Amino acid sequence: MMCCKDIHKILDGSGDRLCGIKEFKKKCFLDVDKPAVLVRGKPEKWSWGVLCALITLDVHLRDTVAGTVANTESFEFQKQVRY
């Protein structure tokens, strides 16, 4: 939910959308690293599943945002029609 809220805020805002989504992409890459460090240690058995689920969600979000940035850099992202 939080990632959808953040992306909506970027796309619906009045600022530079492409710059905003690029900054969010950087945040996504950092968000994947945090739980990955915990998995490299020896997490408790109960937390292993939670960490794997968080990492999976973060990786999918990261890949989606990275793909969005890659696909929109060649277009004029600033003047797209709002929904």
Image (cartoon, rainbow, N blue to C red):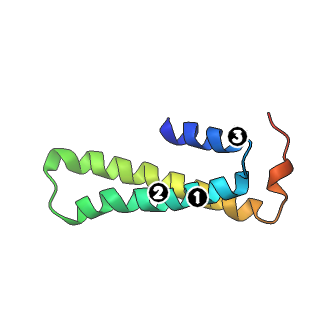
Helix, strand or loop under label 2: helix
In the rendered structure, find residue 43 and report the number of the disc placed on it.
none
Amino acid on which the number 1 mark rests in the picture? Glu
Which residue occupies 74% across, 42% down?
Answer: 14
Could you say which quadrant of the image residue 65 lies in? bottom right
Q: Nearer the viewer, mark 1 or mark 2?
A: 1
Q: Is residue 76 above or below residue 8?
A: below
Q: Counting residues from the N terminus, which is met first, the one under dot 2 or under dot 3?
A: 3
Can you say which quadrant of the picture contains the C terminus? top right
Which residue occupies 64% across, 53% down?
Answer: 20
Q: Which residue is mark 1?
A: 23
Amino acid on which the number 2 mark rests in the picture? Val
Q: Position of residue 59 (x, y in %)?
A: 47, 57
Helix, strand or loop under label 3: loop
Q: Which residue is mark 2?
A: 59
Q: How many marks?
A: 3
